[in-house]
Amino acid sequence: MKNLKWKIVTLCIAIVTVYTACTKDFLDVNKNPNALQNANSQEMLSPVLASVCYTMGMAASQVLGCYWSQYWTLAPGGPQYKSYEEYNIEPDDFDNRFWGYFYSRTLMNAKTMKLKAKADEKYSLYLMGAVMETYAYQILVDLFDNVPYSQALKMNDAVDQPKFDEGKSVYEGMIKNLNEALQTPYKKGFRPGKEDIFFEGNMDKWEQFANTLKLKIYLRQSKNNLMKDSIAALFAKNNFLTVDVAITQFTDQGSQRNPQYETDIFLHGNNDNVASETVVEFLKTNKDTARLAKLFYLPKKGTDFKGLKQGNYMKANEDLLTADNFSRPIVTATTPVYLMTAAESYFLQAEAVARGYATGDAKSLYERGIVAAFARLGLSAAKADEVYADNNAPYNFDKAADKIQAIATQKWLSMTNIQGIESFIENVRLGFPTFQSSVSSKFPAGLLPKRLPYPKSEVDNNPNISPYKNNANIVFEPVWWAK
């Protein structure tokens, strides 16, 4: 198991090395994340970008997000992930997932890269580091609420037990971090090449990524209407993502595959996950079968797409007690890991306009989001228009009484199989679509998870966590922006 763990930890970094044709020394640095501290800022770029993608794309992250977004559910007889369906998450379940990987790898290395890039006046790398820092910190806050920020990543200053900052303060720090980076001359001087595995040094796209990330940060606070003026100012620049942010360089070779595919499918035989009845029936009811066929396989035993009721792995009818009776999600060796998509960008913009935070055409942005979601699956704009025209709400924007519900629902569909964690977080914020709790939940009916418990390593080793220690129901307590 130890060798398997390290094989998967280096997965994304390995494919980056192959893709960029780096030197042997660079490969050695990537095998040991701690050794990155001795690399220069350019050498650190690919591992920093890949580490974020690994954390978001690894099996545990993907499965948790896709279960709690009701895209997938545990297969009958599935050997693991039962705690996810039960909402019975223990403090050590995600010790070395989001918290451990982000703090010990992504954030530490991104900060080091920023400092070296600033000293070398390589401001393109400085902006990239700031964007990756912000992306990781937002995931941490959205999953855990209050986290170490102002005193984090200061091991050289002997701060090994950093204080916890309130989520709102971390959000303010993230915006400041992005603004400082955007004020540098990042389009002048040095630009990376293929070591920038997202955009190959296209700083216009990095600027758009930063702006779209800021929009997401602002809209997370929509419940309290806190950021209306900031959103309006951002829209005045009208410079948001129109492309996906993803690692697309996977191949069907050892240690170069999509990380969730590598563990759940290639190594463990694809025995754990089947389609959730929630998303399958939604797509079928709304005659969105073109997307359904791109997202899920037909059952091995059956001629129609079929999902299992969420959490029903122990209570299925006797004739349905094998995974072969249900559709499975389409995840291949080369499926990209997405941090943000063009569809998500358009839906964020549509929401901002629909809420009255900015001027624009919410309907047009919404429709562009649907077209982009179809395009990512290899489906034409004509097919998107056909499905759109053949439906009422929550497809046809004009017929939708609640525009935010329509936008949230289409965003949920666009993230199927690829952005489970982001979809879960957005469902906590927006409440659409409406989910029934898992039938195997260990808690009272109707309760849905809203966050993760703090990891055991932090609870045991950092006394500053004391005001925020776990309780039995912490998974159902909202983070700051949802209160």
Image: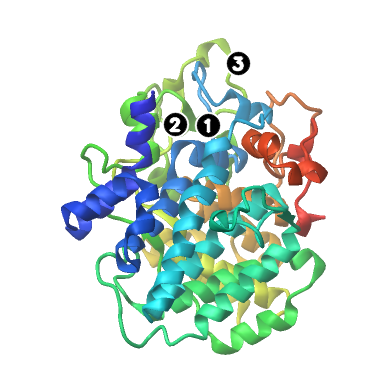
Query: Is disc 1 placed on a helix, strand or loop?
Result: loop
Q: Is residue 476 above or below residue 210?
A: above
Q: Quadrant of residue 442?
A: top right
Q: Quadrant of residue 264?
A: top left
Task: Characterize the local packing of mark 3: few (<14), some (14-19) or many (20 or more) Cα atoms within 10 angstroms.
Answer: some
Dot 3 or dot 1, earlier in sequence = 1
Query: Is disc 2 placed on a helix, strand or loop?
Result: loop
Q: Are marks 2 and 1 in contact (CB under 8 Å)?
A: yes
Quote the CA–CA distance across marks 3 and 2: 17 Å
Q: Residue furthest top?
A: 318
| 434 and 120: which is toward the camera | 120
Quote the CA–CA distance across marks 3 and 1: 15 Å
Q: Quadrant of the C terminus?
A: bottom right
Q: Amino acid at mark 3?
A: Met
Quote the CA–CA distance across marks 2 and 1: 6 Å
Please provide percent x and percent y for residue 263: 37, 31
Q: Amino acid at mark 1?
A: Gly
Residue under circle 2? Answer: 327
Residue under circle 3? Answer: 314
Query: Is disc 3 placed on a helix, strand or loop?
Result: loop
Q: Residue at x 69, y 25 (%)?
A: 439
Residue 363 visible, this orientation: yes
Dot 3 or dot 2, earlier in sequence = 3
Q: Which mark is residue 307?
A: 1
Q: Residue at x 43, y 87 (%)?
A: 185
Please provide percent x and percent y for residue 330: 38, 40
Q: Amino acid at mark 2?
A: Ser
Residue 393 visible, this orientation: no
Dot 2 or dot 1, earlier in sequence = 1
